[in-house]
Amino acid sequence: MPKKVVIEVKNLWKRFGDRVILKGINLEIYEGEIFVIIGGSGSGKSSLLKHLIGLWKPSEGCVCVFGKDLTKLDDKELDRIRLKMGYVFQEGALFDFLTVWENVGFYYLEHTKLPKKVIRQKAIEILKKVNLDETVADLYPSQLSGGMKKRVSTARAIAGEGKIILYDEPTSGLDPITSRTIDELIVSLRDKLGSTSVVVTHDMISALKIADRIGFIYKGKLLEVGTPQEILNSSNPFVREFIEKGLMVIEKS
């Protein structure tokens, strides 16, 4: 049975003046998989992620999500697509002036007439999915550790029961133990929710641990796509250098 494509990127180019960020990206991401995008700083990973959710529009080419070309949608249609997607920002991007439960339940607070008591309980149930409980519900982001902020940000991303979850550097700035805990959370949520996950990272250990497939970006070009084993066996010199330097972390730990 053929795999269902939920995201399709066709000949995607992005330019800012004379600067070319993305160079002819072609990619298919399948329903239910964890697709990891790796590459060095400035390679274009996060730029690609911003296109997948429609925050940026291509200079050329298109991005199709659930069969809809994002470049051809008006704002209302784009919002409808985004309701099926969650985005975990690199720095968490939590609202400092809101409590944890208000952050998680933000969509319901803004877009529904549900009583706050009901939304709070809904937020607590969502927090349980990321292994947090009611004890953190009334805390503010400034009272949370880095790992807890990532969990709360993830809870907010899944609050709308999105079919696609996008993660931008989910282990960035975290210690190795917390990073591996976040890896386990990403896999667990995919398994529980049946969602498709797209993870941008420069963390080679994380990529090999969680990915069904990996795409390697170098200077705006998608050089290679394959399973973790296929990427490990790559003969491309840029891929090999990235892998070897990334895995040196294991040898030194």
Image: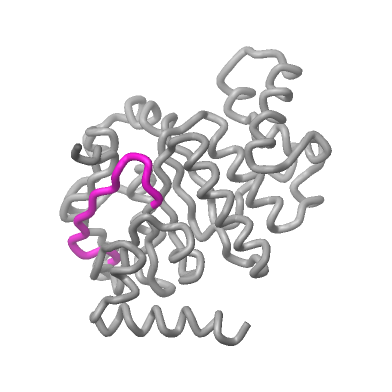
Q: Nearer the viewer, residue 179 or 19?
A: 179
Left or right: 59, with 42 as reference point: left
- For residue 116, what is the image quadrant? top right
Q: What span is in magenta? A: 21-34
Which residue extends farthest front? 1
- For residue 5, what is the image quadrant? top left
Residue at 34% over, 62% down: 214
State whether the magenta stretch is mostly helix, strand or loop: strand
Residue at 47% over, 79% down: 246
Residue at 23% over, 70% down: 223
Position of residue 36 measured from the top left corner of the image (x, y, whole percent): 39, 58
Compared with 96, 180 (above or below) is below
Position of residue 169 measured from the top left corner of the image (x, y, whole percent): 51, 60
Compared with 16, 133 (above or below) is above
Q: Nearer the viewer, residue 13 or 32?
A: 32
Residue 40 included in the magenta stretch of the image: no
